[in-house]
Amino acid sequence: MGLFDIFKKKTKERSLVPTAQEALLKQTATIPDSEKKYYQPDSYYKAKSHDGTPFESEVVSFEQRKNTSIPSNNGLYVPEILMLHFCKKYPNPKGGYPGYWWYKYGIRDVGSVYESLVDRGFLIINDKTGKYELTNLGKTELEENAYVPYMHRHSKYTTFTVWDLNQLLGTGNKSNYMEIIEKKYADIDNGNEDSNKSFMKELKVIDPEGYRLLKSQDKQIKAVQATDEKYAEDKNIDWIINFWEEIWKDGGPKFEGSGWMFRLPDLYIKAKRYDDAIAIVQKIKKTKGSYYLNKANSYITKIEERRAKEATKKIK
């Protein structure tokens, strides 16, 4: 086989890997009707996370990850190992399947992966609880790959994730994962601190107003990231609404982008607080200029339709 033939083969293999959108549609279609109540509405799942905000990024599907990550000695990949860690919550999760299974790990049809872990001997169903339980193989798998649940709970940087750690650990013994994490965090902290200090020092002199704006933006970004992560875990909509109400009390989002501007209206709509949703959209129209005028008007129409639909249901 010549070099050109090898290149053609690799190109063909890559083309067979579905895009995030293709994987999303495919996995959505495989979820049984009986399982759909444990997921968010289909509209919640998108091929991009934080669409329309400074954090916008394309979701990497599990199928895509398999091409670049390293399986464990027993053949499991990062999200499958994490599923073993959380197995006692499933199946039939009380609070539903958290959004992070798709947005962080590229898995939309969570139930089918759990079933495959049973088929492969890592889990069984406990007859008393009706929940999954680790087999001896599953227990060994978790012990050998403790870095996965650790990084899920403690990851500090978007530039260093469990997927990056997976590459650094490679194959074989992974018991030194904390040593690698601490070294990587120290390198990032030192690099970020040095470059950021230098930039901010110069900016403070040449553009004091820009300096103050960046400081406030950075603070808000960190707060939003932490809030989104917490909401993905506990789904406490009242809590996240309160967070965004405080953002608006302070003048609203400090970044442009429809995702930011209409986050609170979206949450109000989800909570069926339609009067509050219209009030904040009217505020966006008044304070954020004509840039969001068309979107704001379409939101008001959508909210009125939702409210009318709810009123009809109550009458019936």
Image (tube, grey):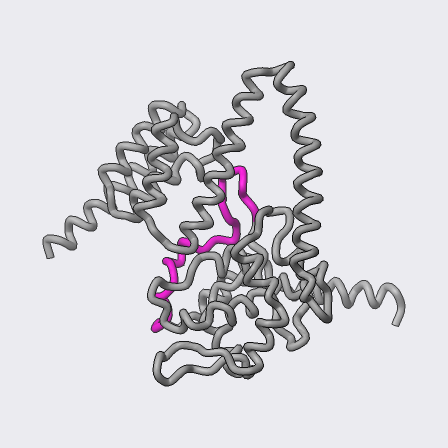
In screen coordinates, is 152 left or right of 296?
right
Asked whether residue 36 is drawn in magenta, I would say: yes
Depth check: 28 or 204 in front? 204
- Residue at far right of view: 2
Residue 214 can be seen, yes or no = yes
Q: Indicate the quadrant where residue 145 lies.
A: bottom right
What stretch of residues is rendered in magenta?
33-57
Depth check: 308 or 172 in front? 172
Residue 68 can be seen, yes or no = no
- Residue at far left of view: 315
Relative height, residue 257 to residue 89 (above, below): above
Quadrant of the frame with the C terminus: bottom left
Principal secondary structure, stretch drawn in magenta: loop
Q: Residue at x 48, y 34 (%)?
A: 220
In screen coordinates, is 210 left or right of 292?
right
In screen coordinates, is 208 left or right of 256?
right
Q: Residue at x 70, y 31 (%)?
A: 195
Depth check: 241 or 260 in front? 241
In screen coordinates, is 182 left or right of 289?
right
x and y percent of residue 97 in the render? Answer: 41, 63
x and y percent of residue 135 in the render? Answer: 52, 82
Q: Residue at x 42, y 82 (%)?
A: 125
Relative height, residue 79 to residue 261 (above, below): below
Asked whether residue 298 is drawn in magenta, I would say: no
Quadrant of the frame with the N terminus: bottom right
Q: Residue at x 67, y 55 (%)?
A: 164
x and y percent of residue 193 in the render? Answer: 66, 34
